[in-house]
Amino acid sequence: MAFTLEIGQQAPDFDLPGVDGRNYSLKDFENAPVLVVFFTCNHCPYVVGSEQRIKALHDEYHPKGVDWVGINSNETENHPTDDFEHMKQRAETDGIRYPYLRDESQEVARAYGALRTPHFFVFDSDRKLRYTGRLDDNPRNASKATTHELKDALDALLEGGEPPMPLTNPIGCNVKWAGKDAHWMPPEACDLV
């Protein structure tokens, strides 16, 4: 069995606290024709390098009916800046406009098979996975990006089509798993594509 959720599989539900004081589950996004669930954090240079692009995509696609959820699952013993208080600070400082949730137990990251930060999962109105992987081919430096797989997937789904490339390898820092080396990856998930 694959570690990471496979194309066509159902979105696993969650019940996680957000930095805004609310708890969120899939039901909170049930009216959105497209849902982007992505695993992120506070410190990863790939997340930091892509933050403005993520916010711009949110601002462009949210009015079209695309809901966004960012989830931070990193362990905090060795990565204390990923704790909930630092998440609240980051959300305020960076002006994050989507729900930013804390997965303290890492159960949601395991259910989705999150590999890196950032790692995107895009679901249709039936909450079937239609795209998973990266934002583009250079999350650290927008000026060097030559592809736009996430944007292409969103455009295709909103037009009733299929994402041109439904599966890509995410590019970023490894999810920081409790009790594992900082660079640990599940062996069955080292190459998705």
Image (cartoon, rainbow, N blue to C red):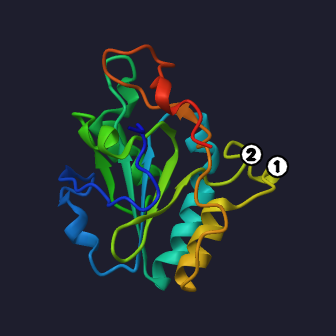
Q: What amino acid type is highlighted by mark number 1? A: Lys
Q: Quadrant of residue 20?
A: bottom left
Quarter occupied by the C terminus: top right
Q: Position of residue 185 (x, y in %)?
A: 48, 24
For disc 1, the marked residue is 144
Q: CA distance from mark 2 to mark 1?
A: 6 Å
Q: Secondary structure at mark 1?
A: helix
Residue positioned 58% across, 60% down in the render: 166
The residue shown at (47%, 36%) is 115
- Mark 2 near mark 1, Cβ–Cβ under 8 Å? yes
Depth check: give the residue in front, 137 or 159.
159
Judge the density around disc 1: few (<14), some (14-19), many (≥20) Cα neighbours within 10 Å: few
- Between 160 and 101, the residue placed more toward the observer is 160
Figure check: 172 above or below 149: above
**Which amino acid, mark 2?**
Asn
Q: Quadrant of residue 68?
A: bottom left
Task: Locate residue 51, reporting x and y percent.
Answer: 57, 52
Q: Residue at x 62, y 54 (%)?
A: 135
Q: Circle 2 sits in a helix, a strand or a loop, which is it?
A: loop
Place of residue 127 in the rendered image (x, y in percent of width and height, measured from the top left): 34, 68
Could you tell whether 139 is left or right of 26 in the image? right
Is residue 2 left or right of 76 when viewed as pictured?
Answer: right
Above or below, comparing residue 96 to residue 154 in the picture: above
Q: Nearer the viewer, residue 1 or 154?
A: 1
The correct choice, above or below, for 94 with respect to 55 in the image is above
The dot on residue 20 is none
> Percent x, y for residue 76?
32, 25
- Specify the quadrant that holds the N terminus: top left
Vertical relation: 81 (above or below) 33: above
Residue bearing mark 2: 141
**What residue do we see at 31% from left, 15% from top?**
179
> Total number of numbered labels?
2
